[in-house]
Structures are given as structure tokens and as C-alpha cells.
């Protein structure tokens, strides 16, 4: 049995992660779940908090006091909290799955450095469908080459703080890499006012934040006379939760290293 800790168990994603572990048939069990010290969910059974059956495990505020009670931590919280949890796991030799987005390049290097000591799955999107789309985007970019203009449109709920989304940026990286471009040099984040004709080498990003949109991503390859669109739409957070739970099960027994969701889905 693999013992799972859920960071931010009272949040939208945290509750879904608890539910996903309960539904899993991979021999997983939620043994720790954290909430903020002032959260009214403190002390509440994690299963009841997530709307499933009682698990006999209550939400706690200090995960470091329960370090001996879990094998893998799943974290979809915030950049500062995830980095603090990462260092805690590193000190105590615990595996971690990080689905938090918005990290700077320096923070990503910090995650990579921790991968020398502990096994980590770090991915901007844990969805099987999204990661299949990344494979399709690489193929499409290589086939279409420089004959098309490329735009990426993403939409998320009003509460999402980072923009563009980590998934949109990853899509841009895949497309740019396939075309031999550096995304940091060709990305255009939004357009306004008068400008010169579109630079054919650029990759544009457009962002929508509204309502309760779980996550929509479309990459447009537009030529003269036709266009190809590759789209992924998530209707439930469960798709991300199931991917993260699959990653947690896969990590058990793995050597130290920084792994991607590709390793989980397409590796051995």
C-alpha cells in the first residue's frame, strides 16, 4: 500500500484528489491531508470533507508533524507552499507530485535540484488528454513547419492567478521546440493597438479568465486557405486528479529524479 498525503485538502483540487485516491484501484490510501490552521475544515474527516465515505483520517495544519505517515505527497497548492513542501520532502526522503503552476525559471531549477535527492513528478498538467495533445502538437508543427501562423488560446476560471497557464506555455514550448525556435524569443502575450504585420515566427498567446471554466486550450495553425486547430477541454478537475494519483502510484519505489508526466504515461 502506498500512503498518500494531500496538500490543501480543503481546496477545490484537494477534495478532488482525495476522491480520486479513494476511487483508485492502485493500492493507495489517503493518510494525511493538510488545511490552513484557521480553516474550519481543520480536524474534519478527509473523506467527509471530499464528499466520499469517512476515511478515519482528519485534516491537519502541520504536515511536518506527520512526516512518518505518508510515502508520497501530492501538491496543487501555491508556489511558496509547494516549494516549502518540496524542501520538507527532500529533507525526509519523501516522493512528491507537483501540479502547481506559475514557477519562475529559478524556482524550476530549485525543483530540478531536489530531483537529485528524491523522486519528483512535476508537470503543468496531469491530464492524459493534454499530454496526448502535446504529442499531436509536436507532429503538427513538424509537418506544417513555417507555412502557418501559430496562436494559443486558453481559458480558465476566475480564481486562477497565473497567466498564461502552465499548460499553454508547455504547448508553446513543444511547438517552438519542434520548429527550432526559442519560445522566450518568439512569444507574444496579447496584442493591443496598431502594429506592424504579424511576424511569421512569433507564437501568440491569448488568455481568458471567467466563471468556473476548468481549463480549455486550443492551438491554432493558420495558413492561407485552411487552418488546423488542436483543442483540449476539461469539464472536471477529476481528469487532473486521476493523472496525479496515477503519478503518485508510479513514483513509489522509483529512484531519485525529476520525472515528467510523459515518463508516467509513456515510460516503462
Image: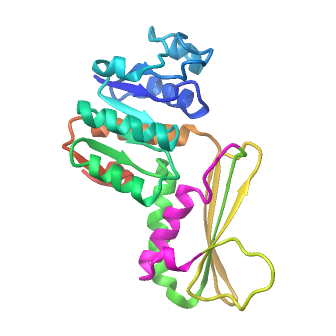
Image-based side of 153 in relation to 69, left or right: right
Instruction: Determine the image quadrant of residue 21.
Output: top left
Give the image location of residue 182, x and y in percent. 45, 78
Please report the bounds of the magenta region as a residue range: 159-187
Q: Is residue 10 above or below residue 105?
A: above
Q: Residue at x 50, y 74 (%)?
A: 184
Q: Residue at x 21, y 43 (%)?
A: 117
Q: Is residue 190 above or below residue 53?
A: below
Q: Residue at x 50, y 39 (%)?
A: 76
Image-based side of 140 in relation to 96, left or right: right
Magenta span contains residue 151 = no
**Relative to the observer, which residue lies in front, 117 or 145?**
117
Give the image location of residue 167, x and y in percent. 53, 57
Q: Is residue 147 above or below residue 124?
A: below
Give the image location of residue 156, x and y in percent. 67, 50
Total of numbered circles in the picture?
0
**Relative to the observer, which residue lies in front, 50 or 23?**
50
Amino acid at each position: 500500500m502506498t500512503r498518500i498525503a494531500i496538500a490543501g485538502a480543503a481546496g477545490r483540487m484537494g477534495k478532488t484528489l482525495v476522491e480520486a485516491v479513494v476511487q483508485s484501484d492502485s493500492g493507495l490510501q489517503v493518510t494525511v491531508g493538510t488545511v490552513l490552521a484557521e480553516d474550519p475544515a481543520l480536524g474534519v474527516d478527509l473523506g467527509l470533507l471530499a464528499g466520499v465515505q469517512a476515511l478515519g483520517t482528519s485534516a491537519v495544519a502541520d504536515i511536518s508533524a506527520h512526516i512518518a505517515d505518508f510515502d508520497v505527497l501530492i501538491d496543487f497548492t501555491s508556489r511558496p507552499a509547494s516549494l516549502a513542501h518540496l524542501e520538507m520532502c527532500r529533507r525526509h526522503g519523501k516522493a512528491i507530485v507537483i501540479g502547481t503552476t506559475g514557477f519562475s525559471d529559478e524556482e524550476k531549477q530549485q525543483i530540478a535540484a531536489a530531483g537529485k535527492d528524491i523522486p519528483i513528478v512535476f508537470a503543468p498538467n496531469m491530464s492524459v488528454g493534454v499530454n496526448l495533445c502535446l504529442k499531436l502538437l509536436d507532429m503538427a508543427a513538424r509537418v506544417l513547419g513555417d507555412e502557418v501562423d501559430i496562436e494559443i488560446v486558453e481559458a480558465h476560471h476566475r480564481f486562477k492567478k497565473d497567466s498564461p497557464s502552465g499548460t499553454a506555455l508547455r504547448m508553446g514550448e513543444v511547438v517552438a521546440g519542434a520548429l527550432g525556435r526559442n519560445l522566450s524569443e518568439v512569444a507574444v502575450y496579447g496584442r493591443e493597438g496598431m502594429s506592424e504585420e504579424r511576424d511569421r515566427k512569433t507564437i501568440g498567446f491569448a488568455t481568458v479568465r471567467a466563471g468556473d471554466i476548468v481549463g480549455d486550450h486550443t492551438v491554432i495553425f493558420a495558413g492561407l486557405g485552411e487552418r488546423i486547430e488542436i483543442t483540449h477541454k476539461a469539464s472536471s478537475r477529476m481528469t487532473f486528479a486521476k493523472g496525479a494519483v496515477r503519478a503518485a502510484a508510479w513514483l513509489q519505489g522509483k529512484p531519485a529524479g525529476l520525472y515528467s508526466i510523459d515518463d508516467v504515461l509513456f515510460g516503462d
